[in-house]
Amino acid sequence: MRLVLTWLINAAALLAVPYLMHSVDVTSIGAALVAALLLGLVNTLIRPVLLLLTLPVTVVSLGLFIFVINGLMFWLVAQLVNGFHVDSFWSAIGGALLYSVISWSLSTLLLKNADGNP
């Protein structure tokens, strides 16, 4: 149940991003659900490999290169999902940052209350 709730929270966060950043577009709830699912899979399977391969660059940049990796994952999903569009790679970095802040905020608020904690 918690996994489905997390997926719905991520889809809602993805729907909120275009209202705050006009270079990201999500055309429907279905596209947001598919994109949220694919973002979860990409971040689970591909992102760790990229983080390991780019570890020297990440260390030299004091961790800032992780923003580039996150933007790359966001941009990749936008290329694969119809109805989810990002204008440029730099927009993908900003969109990924915004998406993570919104989804973290929503999950902290909703999942904390779903566990019965005040």
Image (cartoon, rainbow, N blue to C red):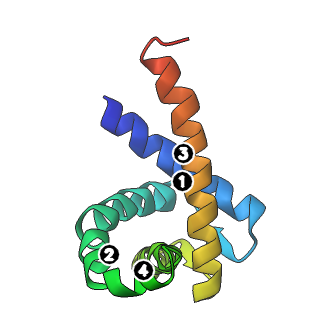
Residue that label 3 marks: 104
Of tags 3 and 2, which is closer to the observer? 2
State the image coordinates of residue 36 (x, y, percent, origin top left). Answer: 43, 57
Q: Residue type at mark 1?
A: Ile
Q: Earlier in the sequence, mark 1 or mark 2?
A: 1
Q: CA distance from mark 3 to mark 1?
A: 19 Å
Question: Is disc 4 in contact with disc 1, using a CB cutoff of under 8 Å?
Answer: no
The residue under the point 51% across, 37% down is 107
What separation in Å lies between label 4 and label 1 (alpha carbons)?
A: 35 Å
In the rendered structure, find residue 58 and report the number of the disc placed on it.
4
User: What separation in Å lies between label 2 and label 4 (alpha carbons)?
Assistant: 8 Å
Residue at x 41% of width, y 79% of height: 59
Q: Amino acid at mark 3?
A: Trp
For the residue marked with disc 4, what is the amino acid? Thr
Q: What residue does disc 2 label?
A: 51
Task: Determine whether the residue tagged by mark 4 lies in a helix, strand or loop.
Answer: helix
